[in-house]
Image (cartoon, rainbow, N blue to C red):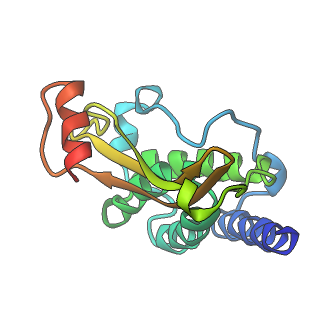
């Protein structure tokens, strides 16, 4: 377990280093933040209209981070996947979102996925946790579905996989977006 944790620590450190190199910023300028995402309401309207500085290099950073997130950092899936959808139309808002994500990754190197198994297989069962936001995408008003699969027992909790996916329809209520998430 320690070897895996160390390797992923190094992997995410590399993500931050690649970001700093391509964005031409010093790692010391990455401030501590509480969440990996920035609220779009904090961004200026013109941030969504101007091409971003990292428009040519964003995919390199995002795909590297996505690889590690899907293995051990499920809380990073939403900000990474939402940034990945913007790669072909990268804006200043995307630059700001990516910087926030890199700040979070840089200051949370010890966040890893953990599990414990203390039951026989016949006492365990799969559990799927599902959730959705409501109209989280300001531009399209589409919601995002998230799910998390784990093997659970009285003394067992072992994460298997997670998913974060933009819904294909526009929901008219939070209840509707939750129903769509459960059906995906």
Residue 66 position in % (x across, y down)? 53, 66
* Residue plotted at (56% across, 72% down): 67
177 left or right of 106? left
114 left or right of 58? right
Q: Quadrant of the N terminus?
A: bottom right
Residue 11 position in % (x across, y down)? 73, 72
Number of numbered discs on residues: 0
181 left or right of 48? left
Residue 119 position in % (x across, y down)? 67, 56
Give above or below for 183 relative to 177.
Answer: below
**Residue 49 at least partly seen:** no
* Residue plotted at (76% across, 48% down): 108
* Residue plotted at (29% across, 39% down): 137
**Residue 45 at least partly seen:** yes
Q: Nearer the viewer, residue 47 or 131?
A: 131
Residue 10 position in % (x across, y down)? 80, 71
Give above or below for 87 relative to 178.
Answer: below
């Amino acid at each position: 377990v320690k070897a895996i944790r160390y390797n992923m620590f190094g992997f995410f450190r590399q993500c931050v280093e690649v970001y700093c190199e391509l964005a031409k910023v010093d790692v010391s300028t990455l401030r501590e933040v509480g969440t990996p995402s920035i609220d779009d309401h904090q961004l200026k309207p013109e941030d969504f209209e101007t091409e971003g500085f990292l428009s040519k290099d964003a995919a390199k950073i995002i795909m590297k981070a996505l690889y590690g997130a899907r293995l051990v950092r499920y809380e990073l899936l939403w900000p990474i996947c939402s940034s990945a959808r913007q790669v072909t139309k990268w804006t200043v808002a995307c630059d700001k979102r990516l910087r926030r994500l890199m700040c979070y990754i840089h200051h949370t190197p010890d966040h890893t996925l953990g599990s414990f198994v203390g039951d026989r297989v016949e006492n365990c069962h799969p559990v799927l946790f599902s959730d959705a936001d409501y109209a989280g995408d300001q531009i399209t008003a589409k919601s995002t579905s998230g799910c998390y699969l784990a093997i659970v027992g009285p003394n067992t909790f072992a994460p298997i996989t997670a998913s974060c996916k933009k819904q294909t329809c526009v929901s008219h209520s939070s209840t509707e977006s939750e129903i769509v998430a459960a059906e995906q």
